[in-house]
Image: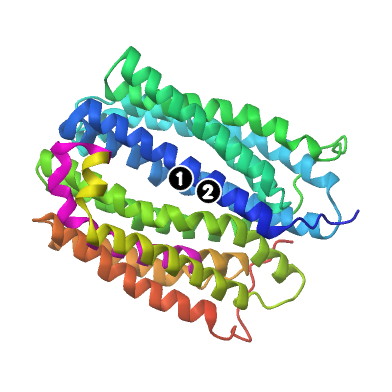
């Protein structure tokens, strides 16, 4: 079977647009919730949603491994095995999602006390989305790995629109509570699975017996470890703010951090396009570092534009988005933008190493997490101290990972084999 060769510029632009719409739906979700709930309750919601960010490595690792497996099979013309593997793993991931949801439900009371939120009920509601997130990310991994990027963008846009509609309807018309806001997340996760099954109909019929494409245990573990560390780096500051700052300040920090993370979200969509390109070049025995350099240039240029905007007119960003009650957060936007631009470099370099089946990024990421948590433990009296810890950790990790990614590959490095 001939491998599909789409226009990466055209389809990549669609993925970027679709992913940005998806991120904008998350932003809209937070904006509507912040305005309707106020700083105190929004701080509770931010803590609940951050639990989803910490669970996201489980879901994103499924997508990353599925993408990498699919790229190998698709490049070598074994498309029929992809649907077989999709069916095989979907059943097992659904069961895993149910078990994870049950575990979160049983631990919801303790988690609520740790996060200092009034009830564990929002955590139970959020856990209902976990089985659907496993399936969604498996499906999107296949779309990504086969470079069906237009279909991937359709998937992202559909989930975004449902989440936005559900947020407006539930929060504004039904109930202005944290529980209602979390329910909108669950509704979007359910519909995404249905849409993705339709988008995957291009795959040829699977063989009668569904089996995994290849043994990927080593690569899966390395991917999961890498993404867990990346998620902790991205989200630990919200927990630290909720734990150490006063409730009002924690809400301000959450709003400023969300604005800062927009810088990362605006560039992370490039990785969706670049990861299968990196993987394909590795499968074909070609050097992918020149593609990485182009990606870094795009990330840098996009981040620079947002950093300037945040520095020159921070109030024009915060007040229209969150309202006057969050206006004091404007003082921190420039620093937040720089901090999460550095995280964007960390993320791209780490994903490049994974695409090349290199586990070398695990050690510096682990050291960065330890340094970050130790920094928050020692410096947490003010919002600026939390930002300073993140900035220093992200800058150091980015320097190390980029040197690994752009430098010559070690001649005797251990390979993470996919077969």
Give me the residue at 24% from left, 38% from top: 322
**196 left or right of 85 in image:** left
Q: Dot 2: what SS?
A: helix
Residue under circle 2?
60
**179 left or right of 43 in image:** right
Q: Position of residue 385 (x, y in %)?
A: 14, 61
Q: How is the image coloured?
A: rainbow
Give me the residue at 56% from left, 68% from top: 352
Query: Which label was assigned to residue 2?
Result: none
Q: Dot 1: what SS?
A: helix
Rendered view: 225 above or below 323? below
Q: Which residues are magenta?
A: 321-349
Q: Position of residue 175 (x, y in %)?
A: 30, 15
In the depicted view, which residue is nearer to us: 184 or 5? 5
Q: Position of residue 235 (x, y in %)?
A: 33, 51
Q: Position of residue 370 (x, y in %)?
A: 30, 64
Residue 280, image quadrant: bottom right
| Residue 239 shows up from this direction | no
Q: Is residue 82 magenta?
A: no
Give me the residue at 53% from left, 84% from top: 407
**191 left or right of 259 in image:** right
- Label 2 packing within 10 angstroms: few (<14), some (14-19), many (20+): many
Marks 2/1 in contact by CB < 8 Å: the verdict is yes
Q: Residue furthest right?
A: 1
Q: Is residue 326 magenta?
A: yes
Residue 106, image quadrant: top left
Query: Which label was assigned to residue 56?
Result: 1
- Label 1 packing within 10 angstroms: few (<14), some (14-19), many (20+): many
In the depicted view, which residue is nearer to us: 300 or 193? 300
């Amino acid at each position: 079977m001939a491998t599909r060769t789409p226009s990466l510029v055209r389809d990549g632009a669609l993925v970027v647009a679709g992913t940005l719409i998806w991120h904008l739906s998350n932003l809209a979700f937070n904006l509507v919730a912040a305005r309707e709930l106020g700083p105190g309750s929004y701080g509770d919601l931010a803590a609940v949603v951050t639990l989803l960010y910490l669970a996201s490595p489980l879901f994103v690792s499924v997508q990353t491994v599925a993408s990498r497996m699919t790229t190998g099979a698709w490049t070598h013309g074994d498309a029929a095995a992809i649907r077989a593997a999709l069916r095989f793993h979907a059943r097992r991931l659904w069961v895993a999602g149910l078990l994870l949801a049950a575990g979160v439900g049983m631990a919801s009371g303790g988690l609520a006390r740790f996060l200092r939120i009034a009830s564990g009920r929002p955590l139970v509601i959020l856990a209902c989305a976990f089985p659907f997130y496993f399936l969604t990310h498996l499906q999107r991994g296949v779309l990504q790995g086969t470079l069906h990027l237009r279909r991937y963008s359709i998937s992202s846009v559909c989930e975004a629109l449902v989440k936005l509609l559900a947020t407006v309807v539930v929060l504004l018309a039904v109930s202005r509570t944290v529980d209602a806001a979390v329910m909108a997340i669950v509704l979007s996760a359910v519909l995404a699975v249905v849409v993705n099954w339709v988008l995957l109909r291009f795959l040829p019929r699977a063989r009668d017996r569904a089996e995994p494409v290849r043994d990927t245990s080593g690569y899966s573990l390395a991917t999961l470890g890498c993404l867990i560390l990346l998620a902790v780096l991205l989200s630990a500051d919200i927990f630290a703010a909720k734990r150490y700052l006063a409730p009002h300040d924690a809400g301000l920090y959450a709003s400023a951090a969300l604005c800062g993370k927009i810088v990362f979200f605006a560039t992370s969509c490039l990785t969706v396009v670049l990861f299968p390109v990196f993987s394909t070049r590795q499968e074909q025995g070609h050097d992918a570092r020149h593609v990485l350099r182009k990606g870094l240039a795009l990330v840098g240029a996009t981040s620079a534009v947002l950093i300037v905007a945040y520095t020159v007119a921070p109030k024009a960003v915060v007040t229209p988005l969150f309202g006057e009650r969050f206006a004091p957060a404007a003082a921190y936007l420039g620093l937040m933008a720089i901090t999460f631009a550095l995280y964007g470099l960390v993320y791209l370099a780490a994903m490049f190493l994974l695409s090349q089946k290199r586990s070398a990024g695990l050690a510096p990421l682990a050291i960065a997490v330890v340094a970050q948590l130790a920094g928050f433990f020692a410096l947490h009296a003010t919002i600026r101290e939390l930002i300073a810890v993140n900035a220093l950790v992200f800058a150091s990790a980015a320097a190390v990972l980029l040197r690994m990614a752009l430098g010559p590959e070690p001649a005797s490095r251990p390979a993470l084999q996919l077969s």
